[in-house]
Amino acid sequence: MRHLLKVIPSILPRIILLSTLVFCFIVPVSAGECINANECKKKIEEYEKKLGELKEQKNNLSSELARMDTQIYLTSARIENTQHLITQTTDEIESLGSKIGTLDASLSHLSKLLLQKISESYKSKDISLFEIFLDSNSAHTFIGKAQYLKAAQRSDQKVAYRLQQAKFNYEEQKELREKKKQELENLTVELNKQKTELDSQKKQKQTLLEQTQNDQKKYSQLLSQALAEFQAIERAVATGSVVGPVKKGEPIALVGNTGYPNCSTGAHLHFEVRRSSQWTDPLEFLSAGEGGRGSWDWPLQSPIIITQGYGHTPYSWRYAYSGGVHTGIDMVSRSSDVIRAPEGGTLYTSSQNCGGPIIKIKYIDHGSGIMSFFLHVQ
């Protein structure tokens, strides 16, 4: 017991330090739940503001983890907001259904009432004031019958007006219900999209922790490697050698692994498209065969496996220079290593230092400010 009392003071500072570090990494900020749409909107504004502040901070592992956490909280708040809106819209649709049912019953009743009055009016339509006068025993009786006839006519007009108004309200409520149903459908689509986005963001954070092993040095190294690849492309554009004209479908290179280990982790093609020196989604140019939306041929032969797509991916955190966007498509072919020109243009070639190893790059100038790039070729 005495030995234990002597040891505790010496290890106590370490225990406190370890506890502090663990707490910092596990619970950076509490997301919390919002009880209604208004509270969700406030949280969304709060997280958007925090996200903006984090982007201004120096890029290091802790700030990147904080940014990812805040982005996750922001998306979670947006999901809760959408869920509240879905509940609210569903309630409105049910309420409109009840109103439409009531209006339908009123419309049916007024229609029957008006038909009845029209029938009664038809039976007495040939009675004139002169006939009422002849049929009356006194002036008092005549005035009473004449007033009754006018009152009946006014009553018919009121019923007709009420019927017209009920019909207008009925159509208006039906139209509003259809509008709300469309809103509900749009909200459901948005909710599914947000949930997919949240899953992706959580996976990005998990991948970051796995790849860096919570080590700032490893994090900086991976950022530097990604930046080296970007700088290699920039130098290639400035210093590349002209090979000559190339037609659509002609072979231009073979899939390789140049740039390994700093700028490549295995044999694949990194395909990138730039418009006016700005990277853009290659699927806008490539044909629909593998999910594209354009007319270009794919640079590899089918079947193609896309190992990393364009945009935000679980691995794109390292592309700090592009705001965390993977600027191209990584792919391999199961049938051939031959890379072919997706569209005609002028072919260039270049070899660049990529943080030590040499990366080989081919690119095609298609004119009109559009260029395609092929990295890691043999």
Image (cartoon, grey):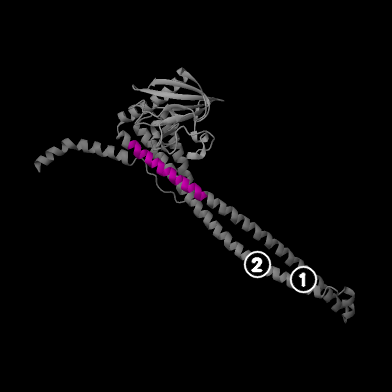
84, above or below 281, in the image: below
Q: Position of residue 292 (x, y in %)?
A: 50, 38
Q: Quadrant of the C terminus?
A: top left
Residue 299 lies left or right of residue 136; in this view the side is left
Which element type, helix, strand or loop, lies under badge 2? helix
Q: Say which residue label 1 marks.
A: 118
Q: Say which residue label 2 marks.
A: 106
Q: Quadrant of the N terminus?
A: top left
Give the residue displayed 59% in from the left and 55% down from the top.
Answer: 178
Spot the residue most to the left.
2
Amino acid type, callout 2:
Ser
* Magenta part of the chain: 187-209
Q: Position of residue 313 (x, y in %)?
A: 41, 37
Q: Residues within 10 Å of mark 2 (few under 14, many from 20)?
A: some
Disc number for residue 54: none
Give the residue displayed 40% in from the left and 31% down from the top.
Answer: 337
